[in-house]
Image (cartoon, coloured by chain):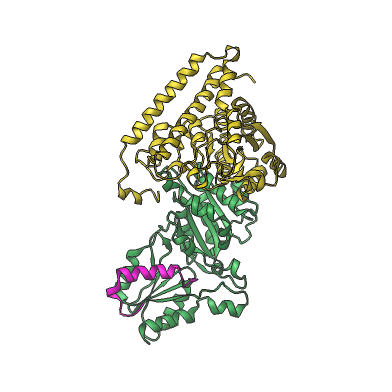
Amino acid sequence: MAELNFIQAINQALFEEMERDPLTFVMGEDVVLGAFGATRGLIDKFGPGRVRNTPISEAGFVGAAVGAAMAGTRPICEVEFASFFYCAFDQVCNQAAKLRYMSGGQASMPITFRCVNGAVGGAAAQHSETVYAQFLSVPGLKLVVPSGPSDMKGLLKSAIRDNNPVIVFEHGGLGRLKEQVPDGEHLVPLGKAAIKREGQHVTVIAIGAMVSRALKVAAKLAGEGVSVEVLDPRTLVPLDEEAILTSVAKTNRVVIADEGHLRGGAAADIAALIAEKAFDSLDAPIKRVAAPDVPIPFSPPLEKAVIPGEAQIEAGIRAVLGI
Amino acid sequence: MDVGKDKLLEMYRSMQRIRQFESKVRDLALASEIPGFVHVSIGEEASAAGVCAALRTTDRITSTHRGHGHLIAKGGKLAQMMAEIYGRRTGYCKGKGGSMHIVDYSLGILGANGIVGAGLPIATGSALAAVIAGRDDVTACFFGDGASNEGTFHESLNLAAVWKLPVIFVCENNGFGEFTPMQTVTSVRDIAVRAKAYDIPGVIVDGNDVFEVYRFASEAVARARAGEGPTLLECKTYRWEGHVVGEQAFIGAEGYRTQAEIEQWKRKCPIVRFQQFLLQDGKVKREELERIDEETRRELDEAVKFARESPLPEPSEAETDVFA
């Protein structure tokens, strides 16, 4: 165990997995320098053959990652900011996601995409969006949203070893979050939720950066005698339906906290699941705490107004508890 | 270039298989015996046959929506191809891909693709994989003049050039993007000149001359295998049939080109030209060619029989093969 921040956990996972498998390599914008720190130092150990700066050419290099995966290697492809995926939508949604299915299972597609997701503070709408909802209705992609350093390492290692395209959404605001992270072989399976705090009165299903905020709110409300369960799905595809339904059956009240937008978002998707499969166990309407349907604005007070924080999560909890 | 008789006959057989297979597929589509869209490359056989004759089994190709010819030239099995086009579970993709999406990994066929320009970055990545894995396999990427206006064309040529990847970009310029004449939507007359922008060789060949295609493709493959990087090979050709089989039903007979133009290109038939080339000086005997024609007819008859007699997929199979 060592105390690592989010970025260091990514870096450690990359070092370990590249050492483990010589067919694994890193490609993307500024991965040699490791602009955000995640890929820093890889070049010294693995050399320019396996650590490749690409041109700013998302359709080209994301498509090349698809071809490289089909041809037997395991690319780890970094698309700096998640919104840049829009420049490579065909390569992700028409190619990576579908070619295994369309080839009747012949194509193997072991790609890990990494990107910075979410509001990082004053970056405006093209660098602050939460984009995983756009991929939720594209079958064939696995979607991973780590909430802290330990899960980050374990989920990324599992993603790299997975034989499917996996997109790992790394929240830009979690970079300095520190946690004890197991050394070496620490794998978190894709499709397994985590109960980050047990509780009896209400379940908060918190995604990504919402987890640490929900935990703070839960600690605060414990002082009032309110027992909050915090469930982190960790992966949106596959989704651990069983864990969600089990928790809702216990608490009978649910808040879903997501930085994405309300319409067509991950929170909407999970709310529909609960409404369909656990309606009888609900004692109150499902509450979504998510970003309103506006692009993420630039100016700090505007950004703060749309990104769900502790206050909004607390208000959501109070609403479903009627307190 | 000294080419052995076996190689010459291999290219002839390849073109015969493509021509006969696609003529049959066209007829079946017009008779509504097969579902969906079908795009055939009749008249363009020489580029597929000539390029693939320059490759070995472990080399890879990417193809297009008009891909039957490339797959056949790379060794695709007619029975499994036909079964796929019929939507049968014995098809290459178990009926999940269809005409536009046939794949055979064991032959290095990374697939036809329904999105114009999608194969270019995939081929570039396939070539990158060879470098990462320390193998000297080459990837050939087929695409049309239409795809050369896609961003992926430009991004892929740049990336392949920067990393000196073992890939050959084969542009089959048939003069039309769907129903639009190429010169009305393309800034250059020859796609090959676009190679200059990426500082790689750009070569124009007569795409209806299989021997010439083979010769220039072999040079490009040798360069790629030696680590000298990509080549853009433009094969000038023409499709005799429409963009999509059955298009006359909605756009008429001469909606975007004249019958006279089509007839003019039919006189440049790549198969007839190659027959004449092979027969002159007694390189091969007429009977040898006729035997190949007949063997191909039998192979095709068996392929159609296999497809017709194969079972359709069970509805429950729709939910398999999404994830590994």
Residue B50 in the figure: left or right of residue A187: right
Asked if B100 appears above or below A88 in the picture, the reply is: above
Residue at image coords 39%, 24%: B298
Query: To which quarter of the image does residue A321 belong?
Result: bottom left
Residue B220 in the figure: left or right of residue B74: right
Q: Residue furthest left?
A: A280
Look at the image and give the colour of chain A: green
Residue B176 percent coordinates (x, y)? 60, 42
Q: Residue furthest top?
A: B282
Residue at image coords 44%, 60%: A137
Asked if B46 appears above or below A262 in the picture, the reply is: above
Q: Is residue A15 visible?
A: no
B215 and A225: which one is in front? Answer: B215
Q: Is residue A173 visible?
A: yes
Residue B165 percent coordinates (x, y)? 62, 40
B324 and A30: which one is in front? Answer: B324
Q: Quadrant of the C terminus of chain A?
A: bottom left
B98 and B321: which one is in front? Answer: B98
Q: In this picture, which residue range is highlighted in magenta? A: A260-285
Residue A229 percent coordinates (x, y)? 37, 75
Residue at image coords 39%, 46%: B96
Residue at image coords 40%, 67%: A269
Chain identifier of the yellow chain: B
Query: To which quarter of the image does residue A225 belong?
Result: bottom left
A296 and A26: which one is in front? Answer: A296
* The stretch drawn in magenta includes residue A60: no
* The stretch drawn in magenta includes residue A270: yes
Count every numbered label the image shows and give the total: 0
Residue A197 in the figure: left or right of residue A133: left
Residue A310 percent coordinates (x, y)? 48, 79
